[in-house]
Image (tube, grey):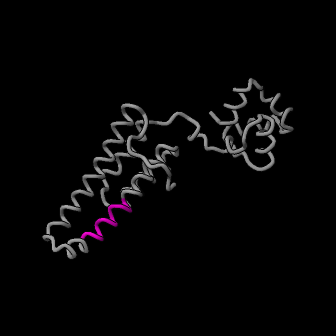
C-alpha cells in the first residue's frame, strides 16, 4: 500500500476529492498510488491538501509497510557467515537492498555490525601494544580475537532471538550509521 493511498483513505477521501482539494489531476494521483515517485510541486500540494508533513509521503513504501521479520532475521544471521569485518556489513547490506527491506530494524542491524567492526578492529590493533607495555604472554592476541568473534556471535544470536520473540532488537544503538 502506498503512503498516499494510506493517508487518503485515512481521511476518507476519494481520488477525485483529493484531486479537487490539491489541484492535482486524478490520473497523477492514480500513478502515485501505483508506485510513481512523489516530488516537487505535486508533493507539496498533496501534503498541504492532506494536512501532513511532505516527508511523511516520501518514506519508501517498504518503510511504511509491516516489516518482513523472517527476512530481517535472515539479514541478521547472514552476518554470522562472515565474521570478518566488512563482509559482515556488506552481505547484510546487499541482501537488504536486493530484497528492498529498507526499514529502521535492518538499518539498526547493519549499524550494530558497523559499530562492532570499528570496536573490534580497534581492539585487535591495540592488543599488541598492550601486550608489550604490560609484558603479557603471546596468547593475548588469540584470546582477544576469540573474544571479539564470540561477542559478535552473541550479538547476532541475541538479536535474532529477540526478533523472533518480540519483533524488536535487544542490542541496538541510539543512532544509525545508515
At a point 74% along the width and 48% down the height, the residue shown is 39
Q: Quarter-wise, where is residue 24 in the image? A: top right
| Outermost residue to the top | 12
Q: Viewer-proximal residue, 123 or 89?
A: 123
Is 118 magenta? The answer is yes
The total of numbered circles placed on residues is 0
Main SS category, magenta section: helix
Q: Quarter-wise, where is residue 129 in the image? A: bottom left
At a point 41% along the width and 57% down the height, the residue shown is 114
Is 138 magenta? The answer is no
Residue 153 in the image: state x and y as whole percent: 28, 49
126 is higher (above) or lower (below) than 17 = below
Residue 35 in the image: state x and y as whole percent: 66, 40
Residue segment shown in magenta: 117-127
Residue 128 in the image: state x and y as whole percent: 23, 73
Q: Is residue 38 left or right of residue 120?
A: right
Q: Quadrant of the N terminus?
A: top right
Q: Quarter-wise, where is residue 115 in the image? A: bottom left
At a point 60% along the width and 40% down the height, the residue shown is 61
At a point 33% along the width and 37% down the height, the residue shown is 161
Q: Is residue 84 left or right of residue 98?
A: left
Q: Is residue 33 left or right of residue 111?
A: right
Q: Is residue 123 left or right of residue 17?
A: left
Residue 74 in the image: state x and y as whole percent: 38, 43
Q: Viewer-proximal residue, 86 or 28?
A: 86
110 is higher (above) or lower (below) than 132 = above
Amino acid at each position: 500500500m502506498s503512503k498516499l493511498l494510506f493517508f487518503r483513505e485515512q481521511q476518507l477521501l476519494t481520488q477525485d476529492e483529493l484531486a479537487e482539494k490539491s489541484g492535482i489531476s486524478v490520473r497523477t494521483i492514480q500513478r502515485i498510488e501505483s508506485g510513481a515517485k512523489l516530488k516537487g510541486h505535486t508533493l507539496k500540494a498533496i501534503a498541504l491538501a492532506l494536512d501532513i508533513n511532505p516527508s511523511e509521503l516520501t518514506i519508501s513504501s517498504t518503510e511504511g509497510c509491516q516489516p518482513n521479520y523472517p527476512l530481517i532475521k535472515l539479514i541478521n544471521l547472514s552476518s554470522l557467515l562472515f565474521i570478518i569485518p566488512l563482509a559482515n556489513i556488506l552481505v547484510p547490506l546487499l541482501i537488504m537492498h536486493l530484497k528492498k527491506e529498507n526499514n529502521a530494524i535492518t538499518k539498526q542491524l547493519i549499524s550494530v555490525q558497523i559499530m562492532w567492526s570499528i570496536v573490534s578492529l580497534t581492539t585487535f590493533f591495540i592488543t599488541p601494544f598492550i601486550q608489550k607495555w604490560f609484558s603479557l604472554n603471546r596468547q593475548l592476541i588469540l584470546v582477544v580475537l576469540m573474544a571479539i568473534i564470540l561477542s559478535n556471535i552473541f550479538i547476532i544470536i541475541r538479536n535474532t532471538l529477540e526478533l523472533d520473540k518480540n519483533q524488536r532488537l535487544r542490542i541496538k544503538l541510539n543512532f544509525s550509521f545508515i
